[in-house]
């Protein structure tokens, strides 16, 4: 595991909106776009998807998941486009996957592939 590096996933929802995301998974098929595609890609109605959970645990880099409001409180940035994925080293943050990229994805496997690709330069 690369010490000092943290992979940071930021949802496009605030902590208080978690119930809205849970309700999304129970909603009718007519709802096509969830409030946060990152959340929808990695969670099922019963919790974190097994393949994603296994990927994160085998990744070799510490991972954190933050809601948008938690990110603002901790990081203090003015960024307003979420979801996003960052690599953190100390107090330095670099966005490695943008909201546009995440919102175009339609599968957990696509997200796993892109995370793996973008991390190549950090964990080799």
Image: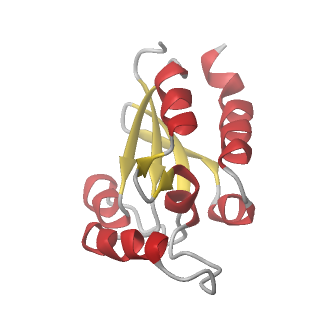
- Could you say where residue 97 lies in the image, as x and y percent from the top left? 64, 50
Quarter of the C terminus within the rendering: top right
The colour scheme is: secondary structure
The front one of 94 and 9 is: 9
Above or below for 40 versus 118: below
- Could you say where residue 96 lies in the image, as x and y percent from the top left? 63, 45
The front one of 66 and 57 is: 57
Q: Quadrant of residue 100?
A: bottom right
- Could you say where residue 9 lies in the image, as x and y percent from the top left? 47, 48
Number of residue marks: 0
What residue lies at 53% left-to-right and 50% top-to-bottom? Answer: 42
- In the current view of this chain or complex, which residue is farthest to the bottom? 30
What residue lies at 57% left-to-right and 35% top-to-bottom? Answer: 51
What residue lies at 49% left-to-right and 55% top-to-bottom? Answer: 44
- Could you say where residue 89 lies in the image, as x and y percent from the top left? 44, 30
Q: Quadrant of residue 67?
A: bottom left
What residue lies at 74% left-to-right and 32% top-to-bottom? Answer: 117
């Amino acid at each position: 595991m690369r010490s000092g590096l943290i992979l940071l996933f930021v949802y496009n929802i605030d902590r208080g909106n978690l119930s809205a995301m849970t309700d999304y998974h129970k909603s009718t098929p007519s709802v096509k776009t969830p409030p946060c595609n990152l959340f929808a890609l990695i969670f099922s109605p019963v919790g974190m998807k097994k393949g994603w959970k296994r990927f994160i645990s085998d990744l070799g880099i510490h991972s954190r998941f933050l809601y948008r409001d938690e990110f603002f409180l901790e990081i203090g940035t003015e960024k307003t486009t979420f979801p996003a994925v960052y690599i953190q080293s100390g107090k330095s943050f670099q966005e490695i996957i943008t909201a546009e990229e995440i919102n175009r994805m339609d599968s957990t496997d696509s997200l796993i592939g892109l995370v793996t690709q973008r991390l190549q330069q950090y964990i080799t």
